[in-house]
Image: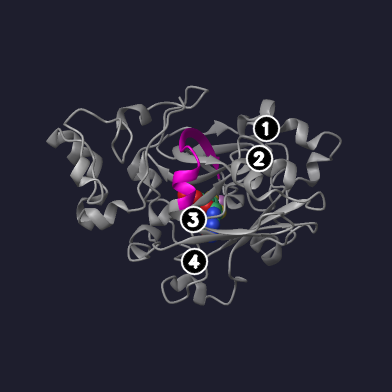
Amino acid sequence: MTKTYKSVPVRSYEITPKETFLSRRDFIKAAGVVAGSVALAACAPKAGETTDSAMPDVTHTAGTDELGNPTNSFDQITNYNNFYEFSTNKEAVASLARDFNPTPWTVEVTGMVNNPKTYGIEDLLSMFTQEERIYRLRCVEAWSMVIPWNGFPLASLLNEVEPTSDAKYVRFESVYRPEEMKGQSSPFYPWPYQEGLRIDEAMNDLAILATGLYGEMMPNQDGAPIRLVVPWKYGFKSIKSIVKIELTDQMPSTLWSTVAPNEYGFYANVNPNVDHPRWSQASERRIGELSRRETLMFNGYGDQVAYLYEGMDLKENY
Ligand SMILES: Nc1nc2c(c(=O)[nH]1)N[C@H]1C(S)=C(S)[C@@H](COP(=O)(O)O)O[C@H]1N2
Ligand SMILES: [Mo]
C-alpha cells in the first residue's frame, strides 16, 4: 500500500490548463503518456516508465482502505469540502479556491525546539519520502470519505526540529490571506484557523502532513500545499494550508473550541458513543453511498491510538 513518488515543486495547474487539471489523469491515460512537467521535460521518461515520473502510477491509488472500503473518487474529494476561509458552502469551495496561489510557500517550525527552522514546501517534498496513506475522513457533521493521501509522518518533521523536554503540545496555524480567501472577511471566526495536538498524538505514525492526494499535488480546496491529517479525530482537527507549527507547553486554543466551546473540545476523537449537541455521532453518511454506516470508535484506528487515551474519560473527548 505504501509507495514513494518523486515530487516536484511545481503545481499541476501551473503546467496544465486549469480546465484539464481535474481530468489530467484521464488525459494521461488516454494519451498513453507518462506525467511529466516543464521542469522534468528534458529528462522525461519514455511512455510506460513511471519510476522517474513526477506523478506516481495512478493505478496504485484506486484501491481500498485496510478495511476494504473503496476510496472516494477524485471528483468527490475535490468538490465537497469544508474550507471556511473560502466558503461555508461545501460545493462552492472548489471554484472559489481556484485562483489561490500556494507557491511560493513556507512552513515555520518554531517554539520549544532545539532547531527552529522555516522550510520551503520544496524542502518538505524532497527531504521526506512521500508515502500513500488511504485514510477514512470523518467530519463531525456525520459524513465521511475514504481518501488516498500522499504525505509523510508529522513525526519525521518534529524529529528534525527536536522538541525540547518542555514541549507538550503542537500548535498549527493556517494561512491568513483575506484578499484571496473571501471567507476570512467573516467576523464570526477568529482567523487564522488554528488547531493543536498533544505531542504524543502528533508523534503517532498515523498523523501525517499531507502534500497531495491521488498522486496529484494537493488541490487548493483540500488544503494546498500542505495540511495535517489525523484520521482518528473529527475532520476539523485536520487543519489545511499550514504556515506555522509551534511547539508549546500550553494546550493550544483551536478555532472551533473558541467559537463554540460547548460543542467542540480539544481532543475531538471520533466516538460513536458521545453525541455532538447538533449531530448524533452513532452513524455516518459515506459520500456516494445510499445507506448509512455505523461509526467506529476512533474512526476504526483504535488499535493504533487507544493507548494515547488510557485513563481519560472519553466522554470529555470533544
Ligand atoms: N484551515 C482550515 N482547515 C480545515 C477546515 C477549514 O475550514 N479551514 N475545515 C476542516 C473540516 S471541518 C473538515 S471536515 C476537513 C475537510 O477536508 P476536505 O475538504 O479535504 O475533505 O478539513 C478541516 N480543515
Ligand atoms: Mo468537518
User: In the image, which disc is placed on residue 297?
Assistant: 1
Q: Amino acid at mark 2?
A: Val
Distance of label 3 from label 2 (alpha carbons): 17 Å
Which residue lies at the image location 80% right of the left edge and 59% below the top edge? 250
Residue at mark 3: C-beta within 8 A of ligand 1: yes
| Mark 1 or 4, nearer chain start | 4
Magenta residues?
123-138
Q: Nearer the viewer, mark 4 or mark 3?
A: 4
Q: Is residue 179 shown in magenta?
A: no
- Closer to the N terminus: mark 3 or mark 2? 3
Q: Secondary structure at mark 2?
A: loop
Answer yes or no: is residue 204 visible.
yes
Tell me the residue that label 3 is attached to.
Answer: 82
3D distance between C-alphas at marks 2 and 4: 24 Å
Q: Distance between the Cα atoms at labels 1 and 4? A: 30 Å
* Residue drawn at the location 31% of the way across and 32% of the way down: 58
Rendering quarter of residue 283? top right
Q: What residue is shown at x 73% (from left), y 46% (from top)?
A: 199
